[in-house]
Image: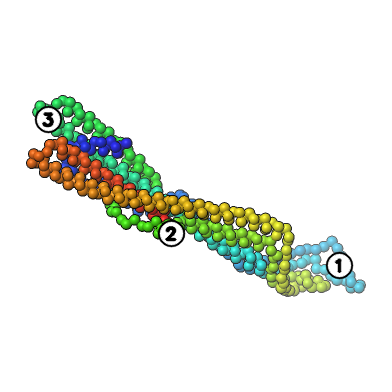
Amino acid sequence: MARYLVVALLALAGPAQAQDFDLLRAIAVGAPMTADVAAQRAVEVAPSVERAEALAQASEAALLRVRAALVPRLEGSARYTHIDGFPNARINGISIEIPRNQYALSGRLSYPVSDLIFATLPQIDGAEASVEAYRAQSDARRARVRLSAREAFFQLARARGVQAVAERALVQARELQASVDAGVRAGVRTPADGSDAAARLASAEQAVIAAAASVDVADASLRTLLQHPDGAAYGIGELASAPQPLPSADGLIARARAQRAEVVSLQHAIRAQRKGAKAQRASGYPHLSVYAGGDYAQPNRYQIPPRAVWQASWELGASLTYAPNDTLVSVRKAREDDANIRASEADLEELDRSLLLEVRTARATLGRTEQNLAATHSSQRAAEDAYQRRLAQLRGGEVTLADVLASEGALNEARLHALEATIDDRIARARLAYAVGE
């Protein structure tokens, strides 16, 4: 609303030295801020980015945990047992003393050969894919935060531009009122002219108040994203923009499919699902393990008859186990996993279609803003030239003061349109870059 009120007042503004008014310099007053700095700061303090990064770190820890299964399992134990309540044994009249206090130190090294091949290796591949998926999710969140910060910055730039032009219009309205009041006192203007000038001044003051409120809101939004304390509105820097060649749609789509973090994340997630399903199916296979162990015990369990002396023994072996119930569960789980994978693949297809629409929309928007940017720059140059001509004609008595006022109002309106076209162009560029994953 403030912007339309400002534009309506521009044509009624006074004949101040318009060529001395630099809109970009006016909005640069304040603590300097650029879109890139805002984007970087927003990423550093965004809780959503911190959460995504924490989840990525958790996935890396899970990968290390899965890789630990590659290490053979080593078990050790120490045992003391006191046995009593029965007499010593007698064999063929020979008494065999059974040690009542028994001690043992044991160690066992085992390696699940079949599980390593069919389950552990696919689990590692799946965990690695999960790490890549979470990393891509973190990148996606960073890109979203950067885009939000840039959009907030450009909205502040827009609000500051409207405010600067409104303040300029207020200066002109005050000069106009002073000129009209002098004319009324001299008898060349009617009191009604003075009332009109006063009403226009009041409208200009209202426009400045409304524009200042919009700046406060936009500045507060940006400060919230950046986690900066309250202060004077940021100074807008590095806002200049010039038309550029529009990239081809096919090239943009290809880049988006290859680079967009959401696509990369879902692709890795599907890969992780497939590897997890493969590892799950392995739970229904027979399990082959090899092992090696040793005991140092008193008495040794393999010694007959048992004697109360420390003896060492070792063993090597392999075991093959199979549970039909595990196979039944594995088959049912495989069906569930396959359905989940198909659902994820459908999500990827839907994401691809959404991505095509987003890229094409962003490209079309950028094309329109580029054309509008070129047109507004041409319009501003024409308005500047027209104003200079009107000033020269006024000095020569060829035009009236009203003609100069109208020309300066048109110049200020052209300046505002050029600024808004620049902002629209920068926003369109930021959104296209986000759409293609840059």
Q: Which residue shows up at 18% across the image and 40% down it?
A: 407
Which of the image's four quarters has the N terminus?
A: top left
| C-alpha gap between disc 1 and disc 3 | 135 Å
| C-alpha gap between disc 2 and disc 1 | 85 Å
Q: Position of residue 361 (x, y in %)?
A: 40, 50
Q: Which mark is residue 254?
A: 2
Residue 103, quarter of picture: bottom right
**Which residue matches tag 3?**
183
Looking at the image, residue 216 lies above or below residue 195: below
Residue 252, quarter of picture: bottom left
**Which residue matches tag 1?**
88
Q: Front-most of 165 and 233?
A: 165
Give SS at disc 2: helix
From the image, state whether disc 1 or disc 3 is nearer to you. Answer: 3
Q: Which amino acid type corresponds to the residue marked 3 in the rendered image?
A: Gly
Q: Position of residue 239 (x, y in %)?
A: 29, 51
In-image side of 395 versus 290 (left or right): left
Q: Which amino acid type corresponds to the residue marked 2 in the rendered image?
A: Ala
Q: Which residue shows up at 69% across the image and 65% down it?
A: 287
Q: Front-most of 160 and 249?
A: 249
